[in-house]
Amino acid sequence: QVQLVESGGGLVQAGGSLRLSCAASGSILRINDMGWYRQAPGMQREYVAVISRGGSTKYADSVKGRFTISRDNAKNTVYLQMNSLKPEDTAVYYCNADIRNISGLRDYWGQGTQVTVSS
C-alpha cells in the first residue's frame, strides 16, 4: 500500500509565502515524476508544477517565477515553495506521484491541503 500525505497549507495574506510538503510512504520501489495540482471551488483540477526524478522541472505559466518545486529522493518527499501568493492561488493543493511498487506502475494522489490567500 502506498500513501501520499501533504502538509503545510494554511491561511496567508496576499504577497506572503507558504511551503507545502508531500511524503510518500509504503511499499515503494521507485518514484518517477512528482507534481502538484490544485483545484479551486467550482473549477477543474489544474496542473501547477512537476519534477522528474533527476530534478528537471516544469511549471504552469500562472505560477512561473513565484513557485518552486523540489524533491528529496532519499525521503520520498516533494516540496512546493510558494512566494508572492495571490488570492487567485486559493485552492486545495494535491500531490501526485508516479510510483512503481510490486504491483506495477501507477499514479497516486494525496488527500489535498487547503491554501487560502486573503486580499
Image (tube, rainbow, N blue to C red):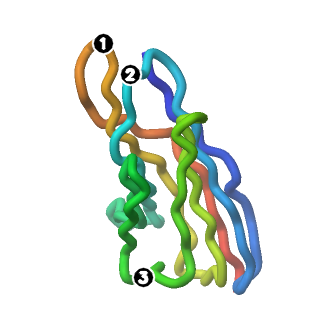
Mark 2 lies on residue = 29
2 and 1 marks in contact (CB < 8 Å): yes
- Left or right of residue 106, residue 4 in this image: right
**Residue wearing tag 1:** 102
Residue kind at label 3, given as amino acid type: Ser
**Left/right of residue 30 with respect to residue 78 in the rendered view:** left
Q: Quadrant of the N terminus?
A: top left
User: Which one is in front in this view, the residue at disc 2 or the one at disc 3?
Assistant: 2
- Determine whether 53 is above or below 106 in the image: below
Residue bearing mark 3 = 62
Closer to us: 111 or 106: 106
Query: How many numbered marks, from 0 up?
Result: 3
Residue 96 coordinates in the image, percent (x, y):
40, 45
Does 44 sit above or below residue 107?
below
Q: Amino acid type of disc 2? A: Leu
- Whole-angstrom CA distance, mark 2 to mark 3, is 33 Å
Which image quadrant: the C terminus? bottom right
